[in-house]
Image (cartoon, helix red, strand yellow):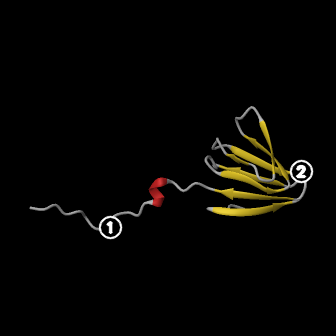
Amino acid sequence: MRLDLGKATVSLVPGQLLKLKGAKGTRVSCMAGEIWITQEGSGRDEFVSAGESVTVRTEGLTLIEAFCPSSVGIETQRPRSAAQPKRTTPRTQPA
C-alpha cells in the first residue's frame, strides 16, 4: 500500500514493521511506546522512546519496528516549490 501523507499517526503492535521509502526529511516521532529505526545506507540503528523523534536522512528504505504497543507520528516536509502558489497572470511593467 502506498500512502502520501503530510502528517499521520500510526499504531504499531510489537514486532510490526512500518516501511518508508524516498522519505528523506520526514520526521518520525515516537508518541508512545518504543521503536527501532534503521535507514538504508546508515551504519547505525536508532532506538526511540516516547517523546523522541528522528529525521530520515536518506531516500532509501527506512524500517520502523515497535518493541511494545507504540504510536508513531510521521510528518513529511513539503517541498518549497509546492508551498508557494504558482502565478497564473503575467507580471506587467509600467511603460
Give the residue displayed 23% in from the left and 62% down from the top. 91
Label 1 Cα crowd, 10 Å radius (few <14 / some 14-19 / many 20+): few
- Where residue 8 appears, as percent x and y from the top left, is 69, 63
Whether residue 4 is visible: no
* Residue 34: mark: none
Q: CA distance from mark 1 to mark 2?
A: 50 Å
Counting residues from the start of the chain, the first of labels 1 and 2 encountered is 2
Q: Is residue 88 above or below residue 63?
A: below
> Residue lying farthest front?
51
**In-image side of 52 versus 78 (left or right):** right
| Image location of residue 14, percent across then percent down | 90, 55
Numbered disc in front, either 1 or 2: 2
Of residues 56 and 51, which is closer to you in this image?
51
Q: Secondary structure at mark 1?
A: loop
Q: Are marks 1 and 2 in contact (CB under 8 Å)?
A: no
Residue annotated with mark 2: 67
Please indicate whether residue 93 sits to the left or right of residue 25 in the image: left
Classify residue 60 as left or right of residue 78: right
- Quadrant assignment for the N terminus: bottom right
Q: Which residue is mark 1?
A: 88
**Which residue type does callout 2 highlight?**
Phe
Element on which disc 2 rests: loop
Residue 53 x, y percent position in the rendering:
72, 49
Location of the C terminus by quadrant is: bottom left
